[in-house]
Image (spheres, rainbow, N blue to C red):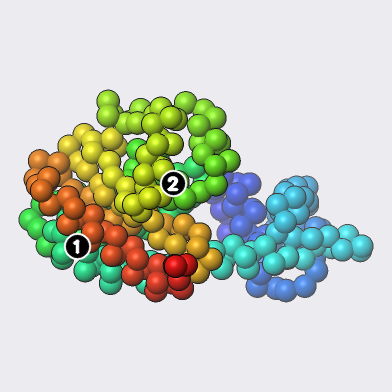
């Protein structure tokens, strides 16, 4: 085996173990795995212990390890995200054409929102947000759209530490944010003006899955300098329709 140079050897070794076990189903002892992968037995043993703690492998009475359904579950979550992106794409393209603004969809990713997709508008210049980046939830219309529909205990976790003030206009006061969440629940429309980046605005709405859980925030992002305030009601309606269409496409049925 050729020499490998890793900047994160423990992470690389963990991936090697997982990839080998996924390609070679069955139970494996630490010594045999170490021999097959040309890794030190001590390193493989430590990797297996961590994977066992995280629920990705289990140890049988003979002291051998085999994969659990943990990786499958992780893969299904990833597949669901890809499916959501595929389902949302045509609606985002329609929204970009209707509004003339950048359109995006973000999904919860721990304590941030992950940019899942971005559709540029038919314009000479626009704001672009790169898919894959993670953004704060509290100063972000798409994050607020999701946060508003989470259980109160998750709001308390959000407020357990001081929220970063991203611009002078970022709302960080828990009382004001709770009031805003209540209004978002009533209207299903979230917005922010100069809260995340000065000179920009966003209008968002939540996407719900078949279980009624908020799984994404979707909407538009634009330059404040070219926003016509008289268009705000129309823009909000376009965003609401987009979110409703995406929700329906992934199985959501609103209870009347």
Where residue 59 appears, as percent x and y from the top left, is 83, 60
What residue do we see at 23% from left, 38% from top? 193
Mark 1 secondary-structure assignment: helix
What residue do we see at 46% from left, 58% from top? 215
- Name the residue beneath numbered marker 1: 96
- Name the residue beneath numbered marker 2: 148
Along the line of sight, the residue nearer the viewer: 118 or 184: 184
Mark 2 secondary-structure assignment: loop
Query: Is 179 situated left or right of 40 in this image?
Result: left
* Residue 38, above or below 254: above
User: Where residue 248 is drawn, which disc sits there?
Assistant: none
Where residue 95 appears, as percent x and y from the top left, is 22, 64
Query: Is 141 situated left or right of 35 in this image?
Result: left
Q: How many marks?
A: 2
Q: Quadrant of the N terminus?
A: bottom right
Query: Is 62 situated left or right of 20 in this image?
Result: right
Q: Looking at the image, can residue 32 be seen?
A: no
């Amino acid at each position: 085996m050729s020499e490998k140079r890793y900047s994160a050897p423990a992470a690389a070794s963990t991936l090697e173990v997982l990839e080998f076990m996924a390609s070679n189903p069955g139970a494996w002892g630490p010594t045999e795995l170490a021999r097959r992968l040309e890794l030190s037995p001590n390193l493989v043993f430590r990797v297996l212990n961590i994977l066992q703690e995280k629920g990705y492998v289990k140890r049988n009475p003979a002291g051998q390890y085999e994969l659990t359904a943990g990786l499958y579950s992780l893969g299904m979550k990833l597949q669901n995200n890809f499916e959501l992106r595929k389902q949302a794409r045509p609606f985002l393209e329609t929204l970009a054409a209707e509004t003339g603004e950048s359109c995006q969809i973000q999904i919860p990713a721990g304590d941030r929102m992950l940019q899942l997709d971005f559709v540029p508008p038919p314009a000479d210049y626009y704001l672009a947000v790169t898919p894959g980046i993670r953004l704060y939830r509290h100063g972000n219309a798409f994050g607020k759209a999701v946060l508003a529909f989470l259980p109160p205990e998750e709001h308390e976790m959000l407020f357990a530490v001081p929220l970063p003030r991203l611009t002078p206009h970022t709302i960080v006061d828990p009382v004001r944010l709770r009031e805003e969440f209540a209004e978002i629940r009533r209207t299903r429309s979230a917005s922010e003006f100069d809260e995340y980046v000065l000179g920009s605005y966003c209008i968002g709405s939540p996407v719900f899955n078949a279980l009624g859980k908020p799984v994404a925030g979707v909407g538009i992002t634009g330059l404040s300098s070219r926003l016509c305030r008289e268009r705000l009601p129309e823009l909000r309606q376009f965003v609401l329709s987009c979110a409703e269409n995406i929700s329906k496409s992934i199985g959501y049925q609103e209870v009347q």
